[in-house]
Amino acid sequence: MPLLVLFGSIALSNPVQAQDLTDKVTLSNVEIRNSGTGVADETFWHSKGQKEVRALYYGEYSFSNLSAGEIKNGDYFTVKAPDGLDLVDATFELKDSVSGEVLGQVIADSATKTITFTFNEKVEGKQNIRGTFNATSMLKTTGEVNKVTYRLPGDKEQTIIFKPFGSDSQDVPVEGEIGYKGGWTNSDTDHLAWWMRINRAGEDLTGKVVKINDSIDTSKGSLATYLVDSFKFFEVEYKTNNTSSADVVSYGHEYKVTTDPTVYQANPNDTALLTLKNGGTSFELLLPTNTGTKTLRLEYSTTTPADGTEVVNSAGITYDGVPQKSWKSWDGKDTGSITMKSGVKSVKGAGATVTADLAGKIKITKYDEADATVKLSGVVFEILKKSDRTKVAEITTDEHGVALSPVLSEGQYIVKEKAPKSGYVANSQEFEVEMKKEGVPLNISNKRETVDFEATKTWAGGKSTDYNKVKLGLYVHKEGQTIEDSKPVSGNYDPEVTESNGVYTYKWKNQLPKYDVDGTKLIYSVRELQDTTELPLKEGEKVASNDHNYVVSYNADKTQVTNTYEVPKTKVTANKVWTGGRDSVRPSLFFKLYRTLEGGTAEAVTDADQKEVPKTDGAVEWSDLPATDQNGVTYTYSVKEVDKDGNPVTTVDGYTSEQTAELTVTNK
């Protein structure tokens, strides 16, 4: 038989070379941005004599002519910086702005004036690659007013006018400025900075409870939270106190800023008390008690979304709870307001982003409803076909709160939560999704399980006309901690309050989280707050109501507050008058003390000693006597003349005893 011989060969391929995509990338919206505003401003302000100004070299890129999967590991492209702009050396991750996945690296090289983008293996298989770059740069200037035109990629030109601060300003008169607010940003920082001038007019604040309030307005801008450790409070000297020239000439004493009321109460002359509210999106600052006529400055920071959106906040100043106008007049006009609004655009930080379409996948991001920065892991979702509700996938969120489905064919699907994270209420909503060629991102929040909490405030003794609803501050600590570890709750929770026979019941229903974000059970308690300062009242401290004092006490777990009437003390003086006779031969007589309640009859004061009266005109005294009974009813005191055994006397040794007033006895 003929032998059939098959010959084959093995082809050895060379490694695929990385390709330069520079001629395939499309650049758009390339511009030089002010690092302080994040905008391509026409004017860049700087200090007089400054020869370099920090800027951001910004642009967007895309690959509109490349198909899915064409970009491979090692492929790269470059962007040149324009003449007159010096890049700052830096290396960035090329991070997917949706998933957080790193798809490559970006290097800004000052020597070659080039930004190089290099993709890694994770880019392969993805489509519609696009993104942004934002490189820190320096612009040269003369230190005076000058104009420079830059030529950017795509034959685009941008002209910038450089001006020193103050070159366009003109002072105007300002009367009675007690508050002025501003802010700034910088691409090199991870926060937005804010400042307030306080009492630049030097008004006398002695004896006033002064508070600063500030809130992020999330309805008109991006979400941000206040950074506790950033707060600084100073005495300062301003250039003037009655014109618009308000630069700080010098910094003086720095006050301590604390979030602990006990620290404030230990040294209120040198301490300001900071209270964060509404999940950290607002704050209240109680100023030190010795501000007097001092001129002051507050500096603090918030987080920044660093995405080019604006963060807006509104501040105000109160004296003894009354809102104050920011100033009386500015340039002769009454333009002061009780609300000082300020907005700062959050500059995108130096770096680069990349976005790749999900290409047939559903991406679920799961987060805490009360705090979107808290991502929820371990949440299970089912993906069903809408047509027959057959399950096509079951996915679970990772440590970043993200769950990614497998590639799905085109059609309509239902996403439903199967099992929430422990401590959260399952989201019962079914989400309909239509899959086409592109993927679908889906953001779903979860509300933490809530717990009902009840506290009582009891008025004990005193007059019912003194009883009123007081402010109770809500406190919380984790299970396993002690009541001493409790901190004020920084949420906006309003209780339902009812009253019966002097007992006020405060109920928080379906509001308070049952667990912390780490799953630990939360324990709630209350503290009574002072009216004006809203400082927590300690055990044994006193509150006043209608000029009557009540002593504050708590039960062990601080869910019951009792205000017990403090009986006021008084001194009683009884007078003795002698008519005729000689003091050397006058008899020994005594006063016995009696008291009468309003509308009642006189009764002996059993715990008051009877006192011998003088043998000349004079008086005897009893001190530290109750002025009222436990219910606040006033006592009227009187005396009767008695012998040493306490028996009433009318005539003795020729003297007749006559009661000439409740506290006066005359012997004739």
Image: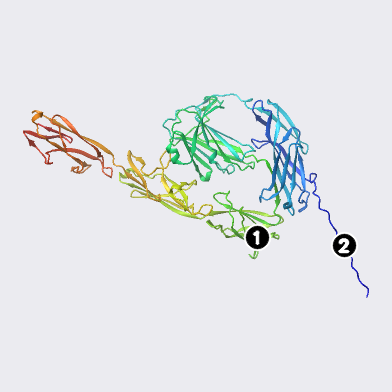
Select label 1 or label 2 by which is in front: 2
Q: Position of residue 125 (x, y in %)?
A: 74, 54
Quarter of the view holding residue 397: bottom right
Question: Would residue 424 be found to the left or right of residue 657 on screen?
Answer: right
* Label 2: few (<14), some (14–19) or many (≥20) C-alpha neighbours in 10 Å: few
Q: Which residue is mark 2?
A: 9
Crowding at mark 1 (Cα within 10 Å: few <14, some 14-19, many 20+)? many
Residue 379 seen in this snapshot: yes
| Residue 510 visible, this orientation | no
Image position, residue 166 (x, y; %): 62, 26
Examine the image and state in which quarter residue 262 appears: top left
For the N terminus, the quadrant is bottom right
Residue type marked 1 = Tyr
- Above or below, 187 against 438 in this view is above
Considering the numbered disc 1 on the image, is that residue within a helix, a strand or a loop?
A: strand
User: Percent x, y for residue 288?
Assistant: 45, 34
What secondary structure is marked by label 2?
loop
User: In the rendering, which numbered label is found on residue 667?
Assistant: none
Left or right of 541, for residue 521: right
Is 64 positioned to the left or the right of 522 in the image? right
Give the number of the disc on residue 413.
Answer: 1
Tell me the colour scheme of the image: rainbow
Quadrant hosting residue 402:
bottom right
Q: Who comes first in sequence, dot 1 or dot 2? A: 2
The residue closer to the viewer here, 584 or 529, is: 584
417 w.r.t. 211: above or below: below
**Which of the two residues, 588 or 210, is positioned nearer the viewer here?**
588
Q: Which amino acid is tagged 2?
A: Ser
Residue with the most extreme right position: 2
Which quadrant does the C terminus fall into?
top left
